[in-house]
Image (cartoon, rainbow, N blue to C red):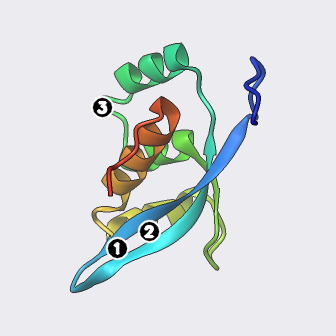
Amino acid sequence: MAKLKLVTNPTFTKDVPIPVAGAAPVPVNMTFRYRRKSELDEWMTSRAGKADTVNFMEMVTAWELEDPFNEQSVTEFLDIYGGAAVATYRTYVSELLGAREKN
């Protein structure tokens, strides 16, 4: 049986279904920054008015794409895949709060 601990890992990974126009979503494995609920609440409040690239890089620390994970690549990624920011945000918050979709 798994045991909970009060000290968590600073990051976690999860596949994010990135919407692709005219095709099925493509899963991209991303490494996310862990936040406690209080930190998540504060971050969610502070996101307003920030660029998508900034918000994305405050959630994600790495990805499994051929392109390097940096501001330029993230900006291009979010511009090409218009639904990527929302899909990533939903996955991130869902994982932190433990929400699961029913099959």
Q: Are marks 2 and 1 in contact (CB under 8 Å)?
A: yes
Residue type of the residue flagged with mark 2: Phe
Q: Give me the residue at 46% from left, 30% from top.
A: 97
Residue under numbered circle 2:
77
Residue under numbered circle 3:
49
Q: Secondary structure at mark 2?
A: helix
Please tell me whether residue 58 is drawn above or below residue 82 in the rendered image. above
Residue type of the residue flagged with mark 1: Ile
Q: Quick one: label 1, few (<14), some, or many (20+) residues within 10 Å? A: few
Picture disc at residue 11: none
Picture disc at residue 80: 1
Q: Quick one: label 3, few (<14), some, or many (20+) residues within 10 Å? A: few
User: Marks 1 and 3, how far apart in space?
Assistant: 21 Å
Quarter of the image where the N terminus is located: top right
Residue type of the residue flagged with mark 3: Gly
Q: Secondary structure at mark 1?
A: helix
Q: Give me the residue at 66% from left, 46% from top.
A: 12
